[in-house]
């Protein structure tokens, strides 16, 4: 059973989804920490209400991405975490050798397209629609030192429908994320059991 830290920046929907999947026995993971990049993250209270220990690490409290990242990793390590899942995490993390291959991220698009700095949330959905794409989806990948760049573990595609507004596409992609992240994490953990 691998111990997981769930990193959030917003409402914590993906983190709660993974927490539930673990508790239902759908994967060999045990969440031990919810870490937020802002005290305003709505997911903090939601994770705490589920009995998960939570901590806040704020980027502006640190001089560099490296120092901020190290504080996040130290918090995860203090909780005994072996794997980190980025669940709507919006801050840049640098990845030291000791964490390489042990950080997973979910992205609301089909990487390698529509990734990189500034490409998150509605920005991705607007870009997909503006490009006239026939499909979008979600991607789970390993995190390295470049935004949305590490090895892709799994993807789930959804159609772009005629007349879609960004909010319409967002709802379908989010539903795909709810299916994809537990599936990808379960496969990842089973390979490392």
Image (spheres, rainbow, N blue to C red):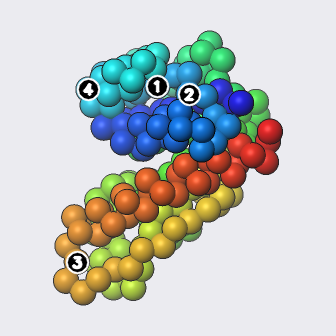
Q: Residues within 10 Å of mark 1 (few under 14, many from 20)?
A: many
Q: Residues within 10 Å of mark 4 (few under 14, many from 20)?
A: few
Report the residue marked by disc 2. Answer: 31
Q: Nearer the viewer, residue 58 or 16?
A: 16
Report the residue marked by disc 4. Answer: 40
Q: Residue at x 22, y 64 (%)?
A: 167
The Cα atoms of the two marked residues, 4 and 1, are separated by: 14 Å
Up/down of 24 relative to 180, above or below: above
Label 4 or label 2, whichever lies nearer to me, is: 2
Q: Residue at x 19, y 83 (%)?
A: 163
Instruction: Check disc 1 and report its element: helix, strand or loop.
Output: strand
Report the residue marked by disc 3. Answer: 164
Up/down of 124 relative to 16, above or below: below
Report the residue marked by disc 1. Answer: 34
Which label's residue is closer to the chain start, 3 or 1? 1
Q: Give the x, y percent position of residue 32.
A: 56, 22
Which label's residue is closer to the chain start, 2 or 3? 2
Q: Quadrant of residue 80?
A: top right
Up/down of 23 relative to 191, above or below: above
């Amino acid at each position: 059973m691998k111990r997981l830290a769930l990193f959030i920046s917003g409402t914590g929907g993906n983190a709660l989804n993974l927490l539930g999947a673990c508790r239902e026995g759908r994967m060999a993971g045990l969440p031990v920490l919810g870490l937020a990049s802002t005290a305003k993250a709505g997911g903090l209270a939601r994770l705490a209400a589920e009995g998960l220990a939570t901590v806040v690490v704020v980027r502006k409290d640190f001089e560099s991405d490296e120092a901020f990242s190290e504080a996040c990793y130290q918090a995860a390590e203090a909780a005994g975490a072996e794997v980190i899942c980025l669940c709507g995490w919006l801050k840049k993390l640098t990845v030291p050798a000791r964490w390489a291959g042990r950080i997973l991220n979910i992205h609301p698009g089909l990487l390698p397209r529509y990734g990189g700095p500034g490409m998150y949330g509605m920005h991705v959905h607007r870009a997909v629609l503006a490009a006239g794409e026939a499909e979008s989806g979600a991607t789970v990948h390993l995190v390295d030192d470049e935004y949305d760049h590490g090895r892709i573990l799994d993807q789930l595609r959804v159609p772009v429908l005629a007349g879609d507004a960004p909010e319409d596409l967002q709802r379908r992609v989010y539903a795909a994320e709810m299916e994809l992240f537990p599936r990808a994490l379960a496969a990842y953990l089973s390979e490392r059991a």
